[in-house]
Amino acid sequence: MKKLLNIFPKLKTYSILSLMNRLHILKEKKNILFRRSWAQFLRGDANEALETARECLELQEKYENRSDIAYTLQVLGAICMGKGEYTLALDYTSRSVTIFEEIGDKMGLGTSLGILGSISYMEGKLNQAVKYCKQSLSFKMISNRVKADNLNILGQVYSNRGEINKALGYYKKGIVIAEKANVYDVFIRFQIAIGSIFLLKGEYDLAIEYLEPSLSLAEKINDAFGIVLSLIYLGMIYIENEFFLVYYTFIINRLKK
C-alpha cells in the first residue's frame, strides 16, 4: 500500500507534463496552420488558404485562446472577401470585431474594421464603407497597409460621388503611406487614381507625372492590371490632345518590351 501511495505523486506529475506537452504541440500546430493559411492566401491559393484557416480555427477553439481565434476569424474574413464571398466575409470579420472589442485589442479591431470597410465598398454600401474606414483610421496602431487600403477606399467613394478634390486629398495621403510601407501594388493604384483625377480636371501634364511612373513601376513588378490601367489613361491623354502618332509609337515601344 505504501508503495502504491508513493507512485501517485509521480503519476500526477507525469499527467501534468503529458498535458502540457500536448498543449504545446497543439499551440505549435495552430501557429503553423495560421502562418500557412496567410502564405497560401498571399500567393493566390484562396481555396487552400480557406481550408487551412478553418482547420486552424477548429484547433484554436479547443485551445480557447480568444485572441488567436479573433485573428484567425480576421484572416478568414479577408480570404472570403478576396474570393468574392461577401456574406461569409462579413460573418467572420464581424465575429472578430466582437472578440477584439471584448478583449481590448485595438490593433486587431482597427484592422477588422478596415476589412468591413472593404467588404461594404465591394457590396456597394458606400456610406457603411466610409464609416468603417474612418473608424479604422482612428486607431493609430494599425499597419500602414491597412491605412493605405482605407484611404484608397475613401478616395474611390468620394471620386464616385464626384467630390474630386476630397478624393484627391485621400489619395495624396495614401500614396505617402504606401511608399513608406513599400506596398507597391497599392502605391501604383494611388498613382493611377491621382493621374486619372488630373486627367478629368484637364491638367494633362500633372496626370502624366503620375501615370508614366505608375506604368514603369507596374512593368517592373509585373502588375498586369496596373499596366493596363496606366496605358488606358495615358492613351486618353494622348488622344484627347490629338497626339495619335505619339500614342501609337508609345504603345508599340511598350509592346516590344
Image (tube, helix red, strand yellow):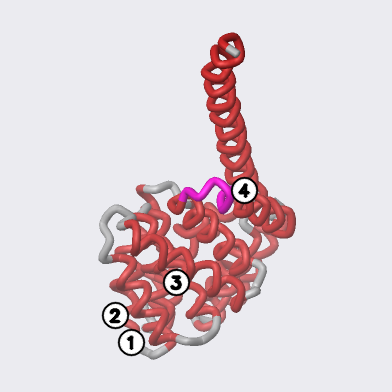
The secondary element bearing badge 2 is classed as: helix
- The residue type indicated by label 4 comes to Leu
Locate residue 67, reporting x and y percent: 43, 51
Observer-side mark, 3 or 4, equals 4
Q: Which residues are magenta?
A: 59-65
The CA span between labels 1 and 3 is 13 Å
Q: Which residue is mark 4?
A: 59
Q: Are marks 2 and 4 in contact (CB under 8 Å)?
A: no
> Callout 2 environment at 10 Å: few (<14), some (14 to 19), or many (20+)?
some
Observer-side mark, 4 or 1, equals 4
Precedes in sequence: disc 2 or disc 3: 2
The CA span between labels 2 and 4 is 46 Å
Q: Is residue 149 visible?
A: no
Q: Which residue is mark 2?
A: 166
The one nearer the camera, 213 or 81, is: 81
> Callout 4 environment at 10 Å: few (<14), some (14 to 19), or many (20+)?
some
The CA span between labels 2 and 1 is 6 Å
Query: Residue at (48%, 72%) from the top-left corner?
Result: 118
The one nearer the camera, 109 or 151, is: 109
Q: Which residue is mark 1?
A: 163
Locate residue 92, reporting x and y percent: 55, 67
Is 26 on the left-hand or right-hand side of 107?
right
The secondary element bearing badge 1 is classed as: loop
Precedes in sequence: disc 4 or disc 1: 4
Q: Is residue 21 above or below residue 166?
A: above
